[in-house]
Image (cartoon, helix red, strand yellow):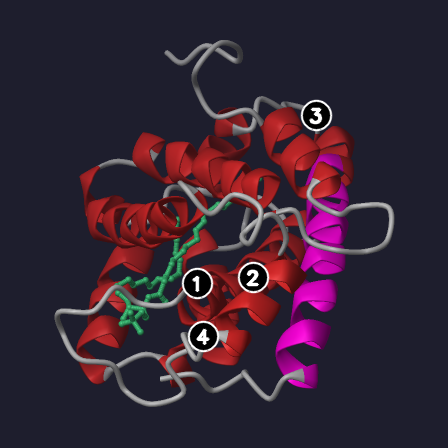
Amino acid sequence: TRQCEGKDFQITRLLGAFRSCISENGHILLKEYLSGWEELIKFMDSLGMVFGFISQETTTKINIMRGHLTGNSDEYHTLQSMVRYELDRGLVNFKELPQDQVPSGCRTLLRLHRALKWLQLFLYKLSTSTSQDNTGELCALAYEKALAHHHSWFVRQAAALAFLAMPPRRELLQVICVREEEEAQLVLSTAAKAIVRVYNLTQDVYEAYGMLELP
Ligand code: 1Q0
């Protein structure tokens, strides 16, 4: 059985990260944003092997971002400073980039940002669902709505397979360490709300700079 403390996934850490990544003036602090994602990776890893490729892909994206932050911590302090820096230097990758080049922070974070849309939909669905609902179906519905159109045919098939292996709601609630139904609803909708705030602020920036479709 899993411990609801220590190094394992903790919903409070997830909440803490996605709350504290918003600075007083509404900028997104990248270090905190990435630590929220690292907590999500722990969650995925606790679900088992089938989710390994999703967790791997997420880790790859996080590592690219960490690479940018290392050594350029001022430029990559916030989403806003990153956008300005990469724009000024022509580093954004508005065109498809050559294989041997490190992807920009802007196009990499955009991938994570799009996945947050999926996550917020899934958390809302989960918070209003019952033990009768099939979590894999909830996943798939949120995926169709938020993310599928950004993915290749191959990735969509792989995602569909992973959804079939999604543990039942009861088990998911064990991972976030809640037992009571009321508590579950509160925890899930609180997490969803925190993520929506981050999502909306990020979306505004990408929209303002016309960067929502970076290849
Ligand atoms: C636990 C189930 C997670 C299901 C997440 C749905 C997404 C599945 C598809 C992911 C496929 C990854 C394979 C590669 C995709 C790339 O092509 C794509 C684009 O990048 P690029 O470089 O090719 O242009 N990459 C991505 O879109 C990044 C995908 C990141 C996936 C992030 C999934 C987030 C999962 C969060 C954990 C679930 C927590 C749930 C409940 C928490 C309870 C409080």
Closer to the chain start, of discs 1 and 3, is: 1
Instruction: For mark 2, give the secondary structure.
Output: helix
Does 2 sit left or right of 159 as displayed? Answer: right
Gap in angstroms between the C-alphas marked 3 and 4 = 31 Å
Camera-near label (1 vs 3) is 1
| The C terminus: image quadrant | bottom left
Callout 3 amino acid: Glu
Gap in angstroms between the C-alphas marked 2 and 4 = 24 Å
Residue behind mark 4: 147
Q: Residue sitting at 55 percent across and 40 percent down?
A: 31
Callout 4 amino acid: Leu
Q: Which residues are magenta?
A: 187-208
Residue behind mark 2: 82
Quarter of the displayed picture in which ligand 1 can be seen: bottom left
Q: Pinpoint residue 8: horizontal percent, then vertical percent.
A: 43, 19
In the rendered structure, are the residues bearing label 2 and label 1 in contact, judged by CB atoms less than 8 Å apart?
yes
* Classed neighbour count for the residue bearing mark 3: other residues with Cα under 10 Å, few (<14), some (14–19), many (≥20): few
Q: Which mark is residue 105?
A: 1
Q: Residue sitting at 40 percent across and 74 percent down?
A: 91
Q: Is residue 109 magenta?
A: no
Instruction: For mark 1, give the secondary structure.
Output: helix
Gap in angstroms between the C-alphas marked 2 and 3 = 42 Å
Closer to the chain start, of discs 2 and 4, is: 2
Q: Which mark is residue 180?
A: 3
Camera-near label (1 vs 4) is 1
- The verdict on label 4 being within 8 Å of ligand 1 is yes
